[in-house]
Structure formats: structure tokens, C-alpha cells
Image (tube, rainbow, N blue to C red):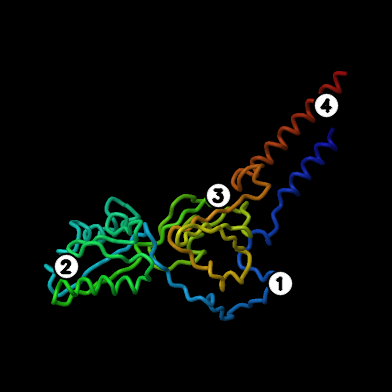
Amino acid sequence: MQRLFLLLVFTTIFSSCISNKRITYLQNLPGNEPIGLDEFIPFAEVEYEYILQPFDIVDIDFASSDEELTQAFEFQGSRMMRQGGGGGGVSDMFYFTGYSIDKEGFVELPKLGRIEIGGMSEKEAQKKVQNAINVYFKEDVFVKLRIGGIRFTALGEFNNSGTQVILKNRATIFDALSVAGESNILAKRNQLFIIRQYDGGSKIHQINLHDRSLLASPFYFIQPNDILYLEPMNIRQFGNAENLSSSLGLIISIGSSLILLSALLTRNL
């Protein structure tokens, strides 16, 4: 009985060991060109430039030497909410102060009406809104347009899963991992799935967080509305990273009790 218990304990412990190769980011993996420290790594051949999509939120701000002109293009209280960080501790302030692109690719602006900016880059959309306001006003009114933060969803083995917002117009996959609480130690970091929206549908991509070549991948930068999903390792069935040691302690405790009970029964016999 004791030998059986010891065998069970050692089998559980060894099966619970996780190699550093399974949890370390940005390794030089076999089959790829080795990448050394301080080596310059260019981005993917296709230059990153996000194209605005339906249901994105854009922040459009107007500036002029005549403040009365810009007030005509602002919703009441929007500037105050920006300056106050969203009001009431709301982290996604652009949800309340920004402009949502509808399913047809239009935004509706005060005085200017509906303007189609879906399918354009930030720069193209800014220029189109600028042209529209130049027709409306002869005075100089400057338009600033940018993505109202990058919204993505983290599912699976993250320490802080759910919908997250990064207040940037460009963010890397590691920015997203940091915001989502990094990946759990029991996650399959070599199998991070990205569900990405495209014109008319979605695609599922898989990336390897262990691989340094990720830095030159088109998926190094996340995009608004990305969904990140990390699968758990098989060892996850014993518990998560926080209670795995507790699970092993429970197994040992139960085994010790069984050995003690067996010894008592044997002595009584």
C-alpha cells in the first residue's frame, strides 16, 4: 500500500512539472532564423495601418481660435468627460464621448450629418471630415480624428479575462497580454487563437508566443474587436496555477489517511 501511495505521489508531481520552454516568451525556435539580442527586427512587409470598420468608435475633436465654432460640433458634456477621465471612473470614456460607425460605415456628426468613413484609414477619414467642415465654415477649424481606443476580448487562460480597452491607436500582442493580466502559467502559449474581423466576416488565426519570429508577424499588432483565446494545458484538470499545490496536498493527505487506516486494520487483524 505504501509503495502504491509513493508511486502515486511521484507520478502526480512529475506530471505536474512544466518545462520553462512551455512558458517562456520569444524563444529562438528550431526551423526559424535565429534572432539575437539587440538585433533589428523589421515589422511585417505589409505596413500596419488599421482600416476603420462598422461598429468601431472614433474620437473626433475640433479646434479653432474661435471656441464658439467648435462648440457647435460637440455634444454637451463630452469635453468635460474627456478631461475628467470619463467621469465616475469609467475606463472606456470614448464609448460615451466618441462617434460610433454604423453598419453601413457612416458616422453622424452635429451640423455635418452622416459621413462615410468605414473602409478608410484614420488619415483618410480625418481628411474627409476636414473637407466637410471646410465647406460648412470659411474660418479655420482643425479636425482631429483617431480610433477611440482598441477594444479586444480575452478568453481562456488569462488572469483577467473579459473585454479590455487600450487607449492607443496601435498596440502589440504583448500590450494586450499585459492588460489581460498576462497568460496563466497553465496556458498553451504556443496556441494563442486570434479571431479577427474582416470585411464581411471573420477568420481564426493561431500564433506562437514562444517564437521570436512573432515580432515580424502581421499578428504582432492587435486590431480593434480582436478576440484572443488561450487553451489550457492538460494538467489544468488538477486545478489552476494558484490551487495546484493545494490539489497535490489534498492527494497526499488522502493517501496518508488511507495508509494509516490500512495500518490500523492490519494491526487489529
Residue drawn at x 22%, y 58% is 78
The residues tagged by marks 3 and 4 sit, at their Cα atoms, a distance apart of 44 Å
Label 3 SS? strand
According to the picture, the residue beneath numbered tag 2 turns out to be 70
According to the picture, the residue beneath numbered tag 4 turns out to be 263
Q: Position of residue 167 (x, y in %)?
A: 38, 63
Q: Quadrant of residue 81?
A: bottom left
**220 or 117: which is nearer to us?**
117
Q: Position of residue 136 (x, y in %)?
A: 16, 71
The residues tagged by marks 4 and 1 sit, at their Cα atoms, a distance apart of 56 Å
Residue type, numbered disc 3:
Gly
Residue drawn at x 38%, y 71% is 121
Q: Position of residue 11 (x, y in %)?
A: 78, 45
Q: Nearer the viewer, mark 2 or mark 3?
A: 2
Q: Quadrant of the N terminus?
A: top right
According to the picture, the residue beneath numbered tag 3 turns out to be 156
**Side of 234 where 263 appears, left or right:** right
According to the picture, the residue beneath numbered tag 1 turns out to be 31
Residue neighbourhood size for the residue with mark 2, other residues' Cα within 10 Å, grouped as few (<14), some (14–19), many (≥20): some
Residue neighbourhood size for the residue with mark 4, other residues' Cα within 10 Å, grouped as few (<14), some (14–19), many (≥20): some
Residue neighbourhood size for the residue with mark 1, other residues' Cα within 10 Å, grouped as few (<14), some (14–19), many (≥20): few
Which tag, 4 or 2, sits closer to the chain's start? 2
Residue drawn at x 68%, y 47% is 235
Residue type, numbered disc 1:
Gly
Which tag, 3 or 4, sits closer to the chain's start? 3
**Side of 12 where 97 appears, left or right:** left
